[in-house]
Image: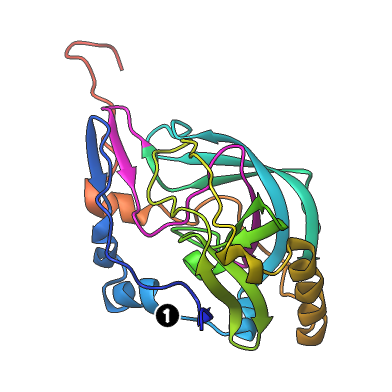
Amino acid sequence: MFAMWGEDIEAKEVLRAFRVHLALLLIGFLWAPHAHALRTVKYDLNGLLDRTAFIFTGEVTGVDFAAGEETPRTRVTFRVHDVVAGYTIPAILDVELPMGLMADGTVLDIAEAPRFVKGHSYLVLYKRGTWNVTPVVGFDQGHYRRIVGPYGAVYVSAGGHCVTGLANQGFVLGPRVAPRLGYPAFGDTAIESFDATAGKICMPASTLLTKLVERVAEFGALDSEIYDTAPASDILFHRLMGPPKAPATKKGAPF
């Protein structure tokens, strides 16, 4: 009754602003033929694994949205708890996302990109090869937040739906048991709550990880030889904002 494949499609939420909030809904400007697909394409489990370099669990210990200089960057720091499958990664993993605070106070934000909140723990499928927007495979399909409810630890989607199983179609989502985090400001925290009635059918976190290891073994080795920890290109920002300006030379200044 409750089960669904992937996240439910909900109305877009209004993004919060800092001084000036430029929402990069113009992402289609860069990937026009595929802009709609970025939000709606659903991968089956093999499709997710085929795009994955490694799978890990870890706690977000820091979110620095002022990590950029000429181009915006948000540095997310994970304390890795366990490498579920794939490439062996360091105990502290820094990921730089192509969004954040610019020198003029403007915040560049990609509305569809997965959010990571300091102090929360996650299960993450990290994308192999190069990436531009997010290293998470399949956007919301590739990261799940760990929360503890009356029945123990479970993993929930970005929309607050708990994982109830793992099948060929992918992660099976059940009822909403926790609030949707929406689009919090970088580094924000959220008040946690849990629907105990709906949470009865959630799969325990430990069981999900065990099943995931088994399914990866059936799939075969992940293609994890090459992966990026920073965006592959700044072309998105150059198209939206123009190329970086050359430093001005003062009149009469010596060469």
In this rendering, is residue 89 above or below 217? above
Q: Residue at the left extreme?
A: 251
Q: Is residue 121 magenta?
A: yes
Q: Amino acid at mark 1?
A: Val
Query: From what the image shows, is residue 10 above or below residue 16?
Result: below
Whole-percent x, y for residue 206 in the image? 79, 63
Displayed quadrant of residue 159:
bottom left
Lateral position of residue 201 relative to residue 210, left or right: left
Q: Is residue 85 magenta?
A: no
Q: Nearer the viewer, residue 205 or 131?
A: 205
Q: Eyeballing the image, is 166 above or below 135?
A: below
Q: In x, y percent, where is residue 244?
A: 29, 40
- Front one among 74 and 39: 39
Residue 137 visible in image: no
Q: Nearer the viewer, residue 196 or 254?
A: 196
Q: How is the image coloured?
A: rainbow
Give the image location of residue 97, x and y in percent: 48, 48
Q: Main secondary structure of the magenta part?
A: loop
The residue at the point 77 percent across, 78 percent down is: 216
**Residue that numbered label 1 is attached to:** 41
**Segment colored magenta:** 101-130
Q: Dividing the picture into quarters, in which one does residue 73 lie? A: top left
Name the residue rendered at 48%, 33% in the picture.
Answer: 67
Q: Position of residue 131 (x, y in %)?
A: 51, 62
The image quadrant that residue 113 belongs to is bottom left
Residue 25 visible at all = yes
Q: Could you tell me which secondary element the residue under label 1 belongs to?
A: loop
Callout 1 crowding tier (Cα within 10 Å): few <14, some 14–19, many ≥20: few
Residue at x 65%, y 52% (from the top left corner):
149
Nearer the observer, 183 or 216? 183
In the displayed structure, would residue 36 be above or below residue 78?
Answer: below
